[in-house]
Amino acid sequence: MKRFLLPIFFIINALAFKASAQQYVLSGRITDAKNQPISFASVYIRNSTYGTTTNEEGIYKFNLSPGTYDLIYRYVGYRERVQRVVINDKEERRDLQLEDETFQLNTVTLASDKRNADTAAAIILRKVIAKREYYLNEIKSYGCAIYVKGVQKLISAPKSLLKSGVSTVLDLDSNGRGILYQSETLSSFNYQSPDKVKEEMIASRVAGITPTFSYNKASDLGANFYNNIFTIEGLSSNGFVSPIAHNAFKYYNYKLVGKTVTNGRTIDKISLWPKGLGDHAFEGDIYIVEGDWRIYSVNLRLTNRTNKLNLVDTMLISQQYVAVQDSTWMPVSIQYDYSGKVFGFKFQGYYLGVYNNYRFNVQQKPGFFNGEILKIDTIANTKNEDYWVKTRPIPLTQQEARDYQKKDSIAAVQKSGPYLDSLQKSKNQFLILPYIVFGFTSTSRDNKDSLYVFPFNQTLFYNTVEGVGVNLKARYSTTSDDLKTFSISPAIRYGFGNKLFNANVQASYLYNPFNASQFFINAGSDVIDLNNVGTRSLFFNTLSTLLSNNNYVKYYRSEFLSGGYRRELSNGIMFNGSLTYARRTQMYNNSYNHIFKAKNREYTSNNPLAPPGTPADDRSFLFPQHEALTLNTSVKFTFDQKYITRPTGKVYLPSAYPTLTVNYRKAFSGILGADADYDFVSLDISQDKIRTGLLGYSAFKVNTGTFFTKKALYFMDYNHFLGNQGTTFDPTYIGSFHFLPFYQFSAPSFYLEAHYQHNFAGALLNRIGFIRKLKLEEIIGVNYLTERSNMNYSEAYVGLQRFVFRVDYGISYAGNSKYMQGFRIFYGIR
């Protein structure tokens, strides 16, 4: 308990979040020379790390104990001011006007041409770059309190949509304006060099429609321009070059605007802009402290025109540093301002972080940095309005306060029984078109119970083994108050061609969502793909069979009983184990219908190893009916596993390191009449989204394995691969092939497969003006497979991607001979 009380104590004291009889409010309004409010100006107490920021109306507020304070008022582009304030036994108001900062060039530079100003900027920047690594590694550890505020507004909307009721749903005025979203969080944040972070979110409040991207946690706003590459999650697949990166002169033009003296320090203002389109660089201004050669503040902009952004058209990043301890400077505030337009809707918003109460060289207990980067308190979202009035460091604007009140009132209504009944009826309404593709979901009004009916395109099917068939499947799940979840999924399948009925049920019980502890059991019978890693879905196999006579998928029947267990043994170590008993029977083609008869193409045998030209009604032998008792185990190691702990469970985040998976599979013979008898082991190393700075990201997978005993091995027990036949393919998994047949390369012995793919994320095409607007991502990749009976199969491909749409062209070789080449397409449906 003490571990949580300490950060709460710091937050309360740092931000004066808890008013008492000895504290009084200091407030005021900051304006410019024209009496216009200065939004988001920094106000902090000298020789402390206690500060705040004005709101959009230029208003600030402190809770202070009686005493004398020197307040520093500061904002980019304005002259810094220091004012002494005495707090006695009453509230104080101090309005202040900031003057425009005047930056002057020295006489020599003023009398010279532009190149001299550029040379002066270069001299300054080289000194800053020379000290970049020192400042990057100066602080070994620190802790602080952080307040994060987010607001998104709609500033205009198409009038035609406003008339259709959209304005009512979005709560907009007659001009299509209004607040769509508000959020605020209070957190304790800890850092340890080089990259360990831990945040404990004490309070959280959200109102409105959640935006497509969010930076609500402190680490989302952890901008550090002393790094060479600056990344903003979700904004771009590439990073952006810092203006003081070691190679910054390759990407930027600089110009010294001038110098000014503030509180005894000389501040240089330098304008910068990219040398060319597509350079993944900022434009704007950076302010440097002469002598120290450190960042004083930044005001930098990214645009869709230059940087090919996702979701927004512009992003403005403002950051201010202050001396918080001797010569130690840290950010006191950072702000991301954004704007954009989607389907005629114009929006703008910001995320603002205010840092307080820095503590350096914090000695944490062993195990404090355990991979948990964020822990959300169980009562974080239950704080009432009185709490927020006392604790938020930035006062709400009138518009924001009204919006909160309105949405709180709406939320109260939405919790009433009649409303919940009406909402449940509305959201559970059955609609034909969504059901066909996505299925149908019905939930209880408290969202603890749900029923999902699988989509129609997975229900009605055709294949040459079963003919026209029906595969009815549903899933019911229920979650208790203590977060335990039970799920059951019954299914029945009937083929009108072979007149065979199958039924099975799958059930699972998740009893601890904080370590993924789960039991599961499956029982019944089913028609199963001979390739156990998957080939084509029922939907795509139906299309290829009826439209082009390509009956790619080969089936067998299994009557089975299976049980298993999964659990995270320790952070980053996941165990899976299952035991299955099955009777397995070979199946044959029984139906040969088609819609379009393909020329020179006939259906193939359901025996995948039958030689080419074998008739479709082939009854050749693949395996006898037999029983198998099989143990499957795997242990997955995720190194440096990061995660978020929410009140509802644990959320795993991608690791910056490869994952290692060890699999062991054994078939026991002689028990319950089981015939299969083998031992198989494999090793898998893989990693997705390896960032490569400005050149996108890579992914790879290497998998190898062998059967070290195989006294009785059947085809479905071979090691199968994720191949592809047909024009469409699924590129969402790095371990897939483009042209590899589904069954012919399945391995009964040693194998090695390797995959590598790189997505340049527009780094190449981004430099071509008319193509840049398409925001295409360039992809290259290679796949490789070798085994004792099929040596050195390889593929190479190039592709273009936009959202979920992708087109690849590739070529494959079997040994030294060309095997196949052509196009492969993907459009989001698997």
Image (cartoon, rainbow, N blue to C red):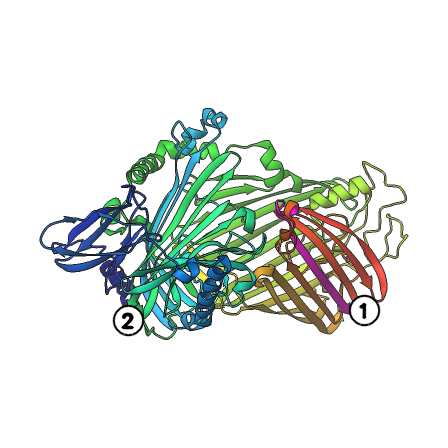
**For the residue labelled by badge 2, is the local secondary structure a helix, a strand or a loop?**
loop
* Residue nearest the observer in this picture, 263 or 347: 263
* Residue nearest the observer in this picture, 118 or 38: 118
Q: Does residue 568 sit above or below 238 in this rendering?
A: below
Q: Quadrant of the N terminus?
A: bottom left
Q: Does residue 638 sit above or below 76 in this rendering?
A: below
Q: Does residue 612 sit above or below 125 in this rendering?
A: above
- Provide residue 629's location: percent of width, then percent of height: 66, 65
- Residue type at mark 1: give it: Met
Residue at the spot of label 2: 326
Name which of mark 2 and mark 1 comes first in the sequence.
2
Residue at the spot of label 1: 791
The answer to whether 276 appears left or right of 319 in the picture is: right
Cα–Cα gap, marks 2 and 1: 67 Å
Residue at 68 percent across and 54 percent down: it is 559
Point out the residue furthest to the front here: 111
Quarter of the view holding residue 288: bottom left
The answer to whether 66 appears left or right of 715 in the picture is: left
Marks counted in the figure total: 2
* Residue nearest the observer in this picture, 343 or 308: 308
